[in-house]
Image (cartoon, rainbow, N blue to C red):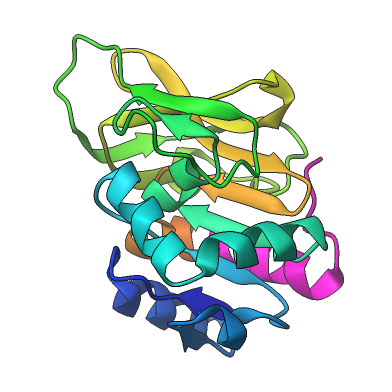
Amino acid sequence: MALLDYDMSNLRSAGKALERLGARVQVCRDPGAARGSDAVLLPGVGRFGAAMERLDERGFTAMLREVAASGTPVLGICLGMQLLFDQSEESPGARGLGLIPGHVERLRTSAKVPHIGWSEVHWREGAALAPASGGPAERTYYFVHSYSCIPDDPADVIGTSEHGVGFTAAVARGGACGVQFHPEKSSAAGLALLDRWLAGVQSGQMVAS
């Protein structure tokens, strides 16, 4: 599995979480090292435009579009989920990866922004990353964000949450998935989600349901 290093994320926690689950993780700083992997993890923190610049500079943008088109599973975490979209109002004019049609906009809420803390995700039944069962503890994750993804096709939304208003917490389209929260910082619930994703990668069934 390729874990992309483009100086816009803390790779340590994500890599450790995957290794704890038995994944063989290769930290990649160039697209050649990532091509041919069975899956790609795109973490991210910071600004949308700056992240896309880093991806472009390292050749990751074209690689991500290529591997996603070929059916290789891609998981975006936090800012990484936002980068899957076409554009963000955080960085006007910056072009996203376009793996999921739609845009990103600032959270329109009277609650404090950024949204920092634990929130329950309401999963679409049978969705690719959803837990099969369990109560709120199995569906509560750690968020740190100020922006929300708006897919053009509502069917791409597989999980929602609330912070004064409802917002998109998880998306899936083909092999491209994204979560707005940090599963690697979300205790047992986050590890369980990553484990479900890895199982889907290994079985070849990590597609939107």
Residue 23: x and y in percent read 59, 85
* Relative horizontal placement of residue 141, taking residue 109 as reference (left or right): right
Does the magenta portion include 113?
Answer: no
Q: Is residue 162 visible?
A: no
Residue 74: x and y in percent read 64, 60
| Quarter of the image that includes the C terminus | top right
Looking at the image, which residue sits at the far top? 110
- Give the camera-side residue of 93 and 146: 93
Depicted 133 relative to depicted 39: above or below: above
Residue 69: x and y in percent read 79, 56
Q: What's the residue at 58%, 90% (across, down)?
A: 24
Q: Is residue 174 visible?
A: yes
* Relative horizontal placement of residue 60, taking residue 54 as reference (left or right): right
Secondary structure that dominates the magenta span: helix
Q: What's the residue at 78%, 75% (across, down)?
A: 202
Residue 12: x and y in percent read 31, 79
Q: What's the residue at 44%, 52% (across, down)?
A: 80
* Relative horizontal placement of residue 113, taking residue 93 as reference (left or right): left
Does the magenta portion include 206?
Answer: yes
Corner quadrant of residue 58: bottom left
- Give the camera-side residue of 195 and 108: 108
Depicted 50 relative to depicted 200: above or below: above
Q: What's the residue at 24%, 50% (across, down)?
A: 46
| Quarter of the image that includes the N terminus | bottom right
Depicted 159 relative to depicted 162: above or below: below
Corner quadrant of residue 173: top right
Number of dots carrying numbers: 0
Numbered range of the magenta stretch: 193-209
